[in-house]
């Protein structure tokens, strides 16, 4: 029996899909080489914005016709939207046979022996102990260090669908990172909704970084996401002193206006954030900083929004993921007064994107002439004599090379830049 798994949403879902593949493989399932040969199609879904849900609902609806030719075919929905919508996904006409919440993947094989059904638990402490994720032929790996989130930003559905925050046992993380290195996945990203609050016995996040920095078989260590309210001096010190920890931080600002930040329950001010940026840049010269920003949060006035643009100009992010605010059922912000009209959200989003494109291009252009270290991940899509990978500061780079360079570090010179890629020698 063959399965085909499609993943939506953030890196946490990518990482969970590797767990799911591993669980299915141990239960005797085989990966299908394409959707056409699958006996089971799984969708690992995201709920963060309405658009993310609509996309996957559209995909399921597009694929359910396959059941006419193959009545034995089953469709399963996993992940955050499964957790949020639960039984509603099994209603007649959806085409869905199985619904499995984010903490119930171990029960998936048993569930698949039934005709249809649901596995869902809202207050599990699941961390999937001892489970080895199934990595494909990748060169980079994600290792989950915390699951869930306790921050309850007022716009965000994640704490509801992923449950309370818990940390993975240090020894399991160490084993996973070592295994990645041994298997040739030399660039490892530690994952959590807020990695800064990692806590396992005496281990906090800076200590975890220092310990993992000793793993000889990996070249690079990264992490996402850092919540600004928990970015300590101790962490900045650890980043600066660990040679494998890359010169990049993803530090979501969300808004450049203090009253919006307060209404978002972010627990820092723009001034706190700017101080962090200053400390990071002092401790780690040339650190690249990326962010997430939301346009059109309830109550955001034109001048509040202007402050977000100003923060972007002041901080000069290397890259920013810009989103327009999307109401999520059951979040605190859904009931806030002064919702910003949809067209206005869209117009503000566009302004952000345009501004960031200019800044990114400028930032990338300052790299021209510099020598950079690239970890080669794949052949370039455009040419056989070129390979592509990332610099330590998380910029995509294209350089001359061949298949044998994949998985190795190359030192090269930047000769050209676009707003997204460094073209190297
Ligand atoms: N834990 C991470 C990731 C959360 S989801 C963090 O705190 O950064 C990734 C991003 O999606 C968030 O940073 C936020 O910018 C955006 N986001 C979350 N909920 C949203 C919503 N309801 N509407 C628009 N953007 C949202
Ligand atoms: Fe959502 Fe905030 Fe948690 Fe990030 S920190 S997952 S934005 S609640
Ligand atoms: Fe990630 Fe989307 Fe879930 S962003 S945590 S997959 S809601």
Image (tube, rainbow, N blue to C red):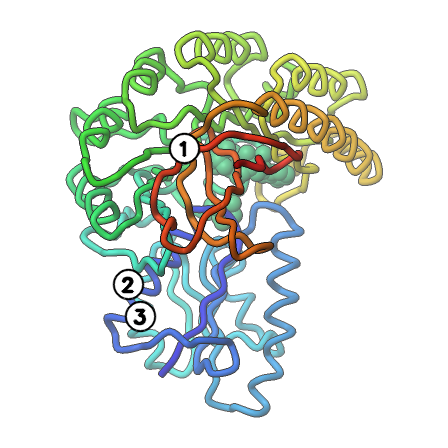
**Gap in Å between the C-alphas at discs 1 and 2?**
43 Å
Q: If you read the primary sequence from the N terminus, does the residue marked by circle 2 or circle 3 appear first?
A: 3
350 left or right of 188? right
Classify mark 2: residues with Cα within 10 Å, few (<14), some (14-19) or many (20+): some
The residue at which mark 2 appears reads as 106
User: Is 253 situated above or below 100?
Assistant: above
354 left or right of 215? right
User: Is 14 situated above or below 225?
Assistant: below
Residue drawn at (49%, 42%), measured in percent from left and top? 158
The residue at which mark 3 appears reads as 24
Question: Between 246 and 325, which is closer to the camera in this rendering?
Answer: 246
> How many labels, in total?
3
Residue drawn at (74%, 24%), measured in percent from left and top? 300
Residue 99 placement: quadrant: bottom left
Label 1 SS: strand
**Gap in Å between the C-alphas at discs 2 and 3?**
9 Å
Q: Please state the horizontal and vertical placement of residue 277, each as a whole percent of the image.
A: 50, 13
Marking on residue 411: 1
Q: For marks 1 and 2, give the one nearer the viewer.
A: 1
169 left or right of 159? left
Residue 358 placement: quadrant: top right
Label 2 SS: helix
Q: Are marks 1 and 2 in contact (CB under 8 Å)?
A: no
């Amino acid at each position: 029996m063959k399965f085909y798994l499609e993943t939506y949403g953030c890196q946490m879902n990518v990482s969970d899909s590797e767990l799911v593949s591993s669980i299915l493989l141990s239960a005797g399932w085989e990966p299908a080489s394409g959707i056409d040969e699958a006996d089971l199609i799984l969708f690992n879904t995201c709920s963060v914005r309405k658009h993310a849900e609509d996309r996957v609902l559209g995909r399921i609806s597009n694929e359910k016709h396959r059941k006419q030719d193959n009545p034995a075919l089953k469709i399963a929905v996993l992940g955050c939207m499964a957790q949020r919508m639960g039984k509603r996904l099994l209603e007649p006409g959806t085409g869905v046979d199985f619904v499995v919440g984010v903490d119930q993947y171990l029960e998936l094989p048993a569930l698949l022996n039934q005709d249809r059904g649901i596995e869902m638990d809202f207050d599990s402490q699941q961390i999937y102990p001892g489970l080895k994720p199934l990595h494909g032929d990748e060169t980079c790996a994600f290792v989950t260090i915390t699951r869930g989130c306790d921050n309850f930003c007022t716009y965000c559905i994640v704490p509801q669908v992923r449950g309370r925050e818990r940390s993975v046992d240090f020894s399991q993380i160490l084993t996973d990172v070592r295994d990645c290195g041994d298997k040739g996945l030399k660039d490892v990203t530690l994952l959590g909704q807020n990695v800064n609050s990692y806590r396992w016995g005496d281990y906090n996040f800076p200590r975890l970084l220092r310990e993992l920095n000793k793993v000889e078989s990996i070249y690079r260590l990264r992490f996402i996401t850092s919540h600004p309210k928990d970015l300590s001096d101790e962490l900045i010190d650890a980043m600066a002193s660990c040679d494998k920890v890359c010169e990049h931080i993803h530090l979501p600002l969300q808004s450049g206006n203090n009253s919006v930040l307060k209404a978002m329950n972010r627990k820092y001010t723009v001034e706190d954030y700017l101080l962090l940026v200053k400390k990071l840049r002092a401790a780690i010269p040339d650190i690249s900083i990326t962010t997430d920003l939301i346009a059109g949060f309830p109550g955001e006035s034109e001048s509040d929004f202007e402050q977000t643009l100003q923060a972007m100009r002041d901080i000069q992010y290397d890259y920013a993921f810009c989103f327009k605010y999307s109401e999520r059922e059951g979040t605190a912000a859904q009931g806030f007064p002064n919702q910003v009209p949809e067209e206005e959200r869209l117009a503000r989003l566009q302004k952000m994107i345009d501004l960031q494109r200019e800044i990114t291009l400028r930032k990338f252009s300052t790299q021209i002439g510099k020598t950079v270290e690239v970890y080669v991940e794949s052949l370039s899509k455009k040419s056989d004599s070129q390979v592509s990978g990332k610099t330590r500061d998380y910029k995509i780079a294209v350089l001359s090379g061949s298949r044998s360079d994949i998985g190795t570090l190359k030192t090269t010179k930047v000769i050209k830049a676009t707003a997204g890629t460094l073209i190297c020698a």
